[in-house]
Amino acid sequence: MRRATWNADDVTTPYLASRLHGFGTTVFAEMSALAVATGSINLGQGFPDYPGPPEVLDVARAAIGTGADQYPPGPGIPELRAAVAAHQRRFSGLSYDPDTEVLVTAGATEALAAAMLSLLEPGDEVVLFEPIYDSYSASIAMAGGVARPVPLHPPAAEGGRWTFDPADLRAAVTPRTRLLLVNSPHNPTGTVLSAEELDLLAELAGAHDLLVLTDEVYEHLVFDGARHVSLATLPGMRERTVVVSSAGKTFNVTGWKVGWICGPAPLVAAVRTAKQFLTYVNAGPFQPAVAAGLRLPDEYFAGLARDLQYRRDVLVRGLRDAGLPVVSPEATYFATVDVRGVQPDGDGLAFCRALPGRAGVVAVPSGVFYAPEHAHLGRHLVRFAFCKSDDVLGEAVERLRRLA
């Protein structure tokens, strides 16, 4: 499987190894450049434009200019590893040894890539849900693996949720399957896997002796009473699951690139072997700051979700006022719309290219999150980010009403 791209990178990058053909410059770069060139509001990229909590930022400021500027320990500073383990106990009930079962990484992206590189043999298959966060397919390809996507289907009505057909999931598992890659809360759809869906994943993992890699970076950004449950908490799953999360989304510090993995010591040791030859270490002054953040009281995490839910509601109302049917997400930073009501040919890419001129707003076509053979499933869908300040989000909504 190769991710849909907007150019032929094997022409523009002739030295690129064949396993990375199809992973060249994507539409994200085009949309960001359009935002700058047109003075549009960029709701395409998922990063907040407001600062994180001072309790976290102040620790980082104090650490700069000290010994924390130098190489931290390879697995991460003990303070952060202990904080990650305590955070896992507090929010999932899972116990991990900070010394052998926790590893600090350069964001969740490195954690995922290191896991693929260390756990997959060439030809091993990875079952995952589509639309797919953009780094997954590239990491699988770099490891010599094969992605086997299972489509998530949008609801027939606006009040529903994205979900998958259990028959599709069962059919995707073959004798070559090595790994289940589970992203919940899910980017870009915003769905949160239900108890029944998690049970099915656990059943398949056990029946086929599969390893599991879970991406839980949006674990605290869950709305409307929905509840994130880590697949690792289900019976028999801890011993086969590597759990990935990060600080970026939880503390509004996406540029710090501090992530972590938790899992059984043998799996963490395997991932650490690959990770040490990628970044080796990272983010020395930021590691004690993230440790402080993970120790914040429960009210901080609950307030974070309430704040994002409010911003989601502002954007969802604006999109509906603009005549764009939207699936209100259960979690994450993103809302997905069906553009066929305002773009008769249903071409989400064409809609996004024209949107800066029509409304002064930038979004991202969801087709880029699908394999080329499945691109038709997302052709008419577009993703908007709502993790923006009140002024920016309010102005974006006013501009979008021009489409009505």
Image (cartoon, rainbow, N blue to C red):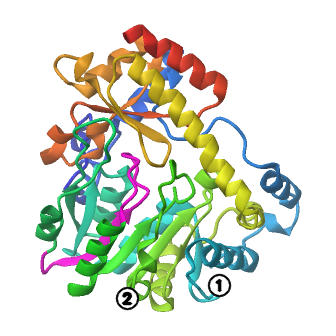
Reading the image, the residue beneath label 2 is 236
Please, what is the three-letter code of the amino acid marked with disc 1?
Pro
What is the x, y in percent for residue 12? 28, 38
- Nearer-the-camera pick, 247 or 76: 247
Query: Which residue shows up at 49% across the image and 22% down it?
Result: 35
Query: Quick check: 71 above or below 224?
Result: below
Question: Is residue 121 something that shows in the picture?
Answer: no
What is the x, y in percent for residue 147? 22, 63
Q: CA distance from mark 1 to mark 2?
A: 21 Å
Q: Is residue 225 left or right of residue 357?
A: right
The part of the chain drawn in magenta is 174-194
What is the x, y in percent for residue 307? 64, 41
Query: Which residue shows up at 50% across the image and 48% down it?
Result: 224
Please, what is the three-letter code of the amino acid marked with disc 2?
Gly
Q: In terms of secondary structure, where does tag 2 sit?
A: loop
Q: Is residue 16 left or right of residue 77?
A: left
Q: Where does the N terminus fall, quadrant-wise?
A: bottom left
Residue 178 lies in the magenta stretch: yes
What is the x, y in percent for residue 37? 49, 16
Question: Is residue 322 something that shows in the picture?
Answer: yes
Which label number is shown at residue 98?
Answer: 1
- Nearer-the-camera pick, 316 or 224: 224
